Image: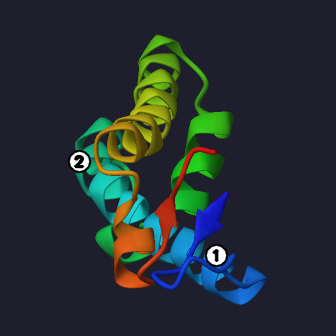
């Protein structure tokens, strides 16, 4: 359960905004390094949805490795941060914290 500093449950809006911040951060961290894996795409076309679309179209061994890397990064991001800090970056910005009961 996520709670605010005062100990009250966080609103759905604050949780959603924290999640959106995390997704934007992860998108930048994941998409920029993946540009070298798909050199045929122009730089102004880069977005996470465009990367996924290209991966679906050009499914091969390299694509599978890239997809697994992205998936592992997403899992590790939340698992490590919430285990060690009880917060992801989005939750830090929104001043939310995961508390075990």
Residue at disc 1, secondary structure: helix
Taking the image as drawn, is residue 47 in sight?
Answer: no
Q: CA distance from mark 1 to mark 2?
A: 28 Å
Mark 2 highlights which residue? 33
**Residue 15, numbered circle:** 1
Mark 1 or 2, closer to the camera:
1
Q: Nearer the viewer, residue 41 or 91?
A: 91
The residue under the point 61% across, 24% down is 59
The residue under the point 59% across, 83% down is 17
Q: Quadrant of the N terminus?
A: bottom right
The x, y position of residue 57, in whole percent, is 66, 37
Instruction: State the count of labels.
Output: 2
The x, y position of residue 35, in whole percent, is 29, 50
**Mark 1 in CB contact with mark 2 (< 8 angstroms):** no
Q: Is residue 77 above or below residue 75?
A: below
> Who comes first in sequence, dot 1 or dot 2?
1
Q: Which quadrant would residue 9 be assigned to in this image?
A: bottom right
Disc 1 crowd, CA 10 A, few/some/many (<14, 14-19, 20+) = some
């Amino acid at each position: 359960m996520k709670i605010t500093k005062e100990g009250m449950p966080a609103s759905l809006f604050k949780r959603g905004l924290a999640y959106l911040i995390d997704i934007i951060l992860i998108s930048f961290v994941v998409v920029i390094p993946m540009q070298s894996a798909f050199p045929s795409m122009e730089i102004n076309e880069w977005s996470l949805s465009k990367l996924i679309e290209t991966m679906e179209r050009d499914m091969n061994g390299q694509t599978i490795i890239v997809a697994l890397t992205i998936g592992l990064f997403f899992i590790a991001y939340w698992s490590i941060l919430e285990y060690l800090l009880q917060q992801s970056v989005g939750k830090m910005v929104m001043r939310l914290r995961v508390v075990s009961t």
